Image: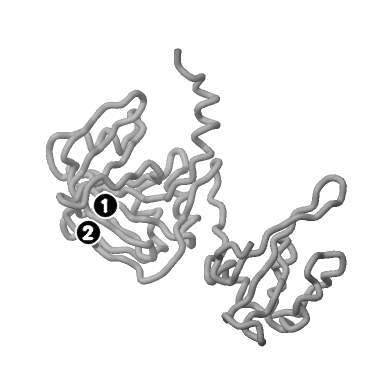
Amino acid sequence: MTAPAAALADALSAWAAGVTLVTIADDRDDIGTTVSAFCPVSLDPPIVLISLAAGSYPAEVLSRPSLPAAGFAVTLLSASQKMLAGRFAAEGRPSARLLLDDVPHTRGELSGALIPSGGLAALECTVARRVPAGDHLLVISAVTSVVYVAEAGEPLIRFRARYPALPATDGPFGAAATATATVPDLSGYKHQDRGASALAGVITKDLPAYGVFPLRDHGAGGGGGGYQWSRWTTSAKGRRSGRRISSSGRSAG
């Protein structure tokens, strides 16, 4: 017995995956497609895998036994390239050259494929093995070149058929934890009398939205340095409960 296709599609949409752009230099044209089914396989030797819809033109091209179809490029897209991912995911898309016309790009020295700038990294690959798998074609490939690796940037993620923005991750509670604002009103919360007022000017303006409030300033006479925070939840009957979290992210009781 197998799972219904529609139910399985819904379930798999809950799998968050990085988004890549696969580009190929065909004899007649440059082609490309957005691919989220990309998987690193081995470092030694360097091998990656992509999964393409079996009936798609990219799958047809990479199924050819002769060059140049054996070579292609994979660009690991950054969060700023959402529009580019959408272009290459659309039905009936034109030549990759047209889709990249307004985007800085280069052509891979080994694959000949078009490679957009601005991604997190870009690889050139050659097909090592093709494995038909249901309605898809698995293309196991050797990595022949690392074209570039960005020094910084956020990945483009596909989740539930969308490209959601990732929360900032700087600091123990995200980038917002470095912003400044005044201490929120803690009336009715436990431990309000344990030094919360000493944190004026260092509480982030976004913390109250997450139910996170200051508990104690350990750097202002408490010893040990840093801060502790309390994450609270409210039951249906209005009862509050929570636990302390230190500025290092460790539970403090």
Where does residue 144 sit, x and y in percent of width and height?
16, 54
Q: Residue at x 26, y 47 (%)?
A: 24
SS of the residue under disc 2: loop
Q: Which residue is mark 2?
A: 108
Q: Residue 89 at x, y = what percent? A: 45, 44
Q: Which mark is residue 238?
A: none
Indicate the amino acid at tag 2.
Gly
Q: Please, which residue is most extreme toward the bottom here?
A: 221
Count of number-bearing discs: 2
**Badge 1 amino acid:** Ala
Q: Secondary structure at mark 1?
A: strand
Q: Does residue 138 appear in this view? A: yes
Dot 2 or dot 1: first in sequence order is: 1
* Quadrant of the rendered image containing residue 253: bottom right
Q: Residue at x 71, y 81 (%)?
A: 199
Please state which of residues 168 and 242 is positioned toward the viewer in this rendering.
242
* Extreme residue in the left direction: 66
State if disc 1 and disc 2 touch (CB < 8 Å).
yes
Cα–Cα span, label 2 and label 1: 7 Å
Compare residues 153 and 125 and report the one nearer the observer: 153
Residue located at (36% from left, 50% from top):
21
Residue 176 falls in image quadrant = bottom right
Residue displayed at 30% across by 41% down:
50
In the rendered image, the vertical position of residue 1 relative to residue 143, given as above or below: above
- The type of colouring in the image is one colour
Judge from the rendering whether residue 134 lies leftward or rightward of residue 84; answer left or right. left
- The image shows residue 17 at horizontal and vertical percentages of 44, 46
Quadrant for the N terminus in the image? top left
The residue under label 1 is: 73
Relative image position of residue 123 (x, y in whole percent):
26, 56
